[in-house]
Image (cartoon, rainbow, N blue to C red):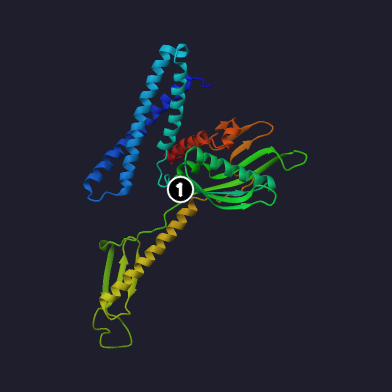
Amino acid sequence: MVIVDLKEIKNIKAKLNEYKVLIDELASRLNQLEKEIESSQNPDYNKIKEKKRLISLISRYNNLTKEVNDFEEIYRMYGNESEDLEDIRKIYLSITKDFDNFSIELLLSEEYDDHDAILTITAGAGGTDAQDWAQMLMRMYIQWAEKHKFSYQITDIVYGQEAGIKSCEIIIKSSYGYLKSEKGVHRLVRTSPFNAQNKRHTSFALVEVIPRIDENINIEIRPEDLKVETFKAGGAGGQHVNKNESAVRITHLPTGIVVTCSNERSQHQNKEIALKILKSKIYDLEKQKLNQKVDSFKTKQQAAWGNQIRSYVLHPYKLIKDLRTNTEIYKVEEVLNGDLDKLILDYLLYHNMQKKQK
């Protein structure tokens, strides 16, 4: 049975007051976006998408604030003596869930938060137990995705010889912002089901989470970004050599890339070839940046002692503790069955505070 906790409602109200600064920032951003979209003949799709997101968040904030105020007033008047107590409990449960979901979405504002998440789980120290632990984590994330109706695809899986998995890769749709909280080493403490004496065993698994970044690099070379120089081509001789300025040197000002072409007799041909070479070099540069960006999301940690971000203790007591946020959860089975929202929200709040302090 749902127990109505008025303290929780007051905590939500206090948090909503704290969020007012963020909401005002979003309103200012929305106003700017609307002006940019109105002044553009061909509005950027991403700007239109962002506008819809901001309108939704601001509207949800206003509705949630009203619901909290109304609930507080109704409960103060009737409390547990109301004939409609069951309805009050349902409203209470709805407010607490809506608040958690809203808080998470409000904090998802970084560049790749709406991208697909590529989640890789690798068994670490702990032998067969670690492989079993890796499979438990895979099941946990799949159940989380199903609870939130995120489509997913297991793209690779390597099974262990006795049990569990050595590694797997899952792509979960539009979930990087949520699952970036899971990046790191996860530690499990339990009595081993693979030990005849049922001894206590510690296992580790590494969870890597990176956003799926679109590799369709669009290379647009603007004329104003180019410095084009012509000069006389040197060579073994001939009627065109050293008489006409057929050679072309193009400098791409934003990147500093310089391309020279002098093989053709026509300046036009040399310029055309130089532009093709320039485009290829810019593409290669952008590809390198893309690879570096993807690498920057990786943890580069070993799945062993001293690196864990979270501990899951099943014996001698039951407790999940996130070592970054100090969040403690005693309902271990619920988390292992995909109820990660409390851990995700607390991490996003922690991550947001860390950004503000930099």
Residue 264 position (above or below residue 324): below
Quadrant holding the N terminus = top right
Total marks shown come to 1
Residue name at image x 29 percent, y 73 percent: 271
Residue name at image x 45 percent, y 54 percent: 293
Q: Position of residue 160 (x, y in %)?
A: 66, 51
Residue 89 position (above or below residue 269): above
Q: Crowdedness of circle 1 by 10 Å Cα count: few (<14), some, many (20+)?
A: many
Name the residue carrying label 1: 116
Q: Which quarter of the figure has residue 231? A: bottom left
Residue name at image x 68 percent, y 44 percent: 129
The one of 8 and 158 positioned closer to us in this rendering: 158
- Could you tell me if residue 196 is visible in this image? yes
Please give left or right for residue 306 compared with residue 357 in the image. Answer: right
The one of 98 and 242 positioned closer to us in this rendering: 98
Quadrant holding the C terminus = top left
Please give left or right for residue 358 compared with residue 24 in the image. Answer: right
Residue 267 position (above or below residue 176): below
Q: Position of residue 165 (x, y in %)?
A: 63, 49
Amino acid type, label 1: Asp
Residue 256 position (above or below residue 213): below
- Could you tell me if residue 306 is visible in this image? no
Q: Position of residue 98 (x, y in %)?
A: 43, 30
Please give left or right for residue 25 compared with residue 338 in the image. Answer: left
The one of 38 and 252 positioned closer to us in this rendering: 38
Please give left or right for residue 176 compared with residue 168 in the image. Answer: left
Q: Position of residue 317 (x, y in %)?
A: 66, 31
Residue furthest to the right: 197
Label 1: element kind: loop
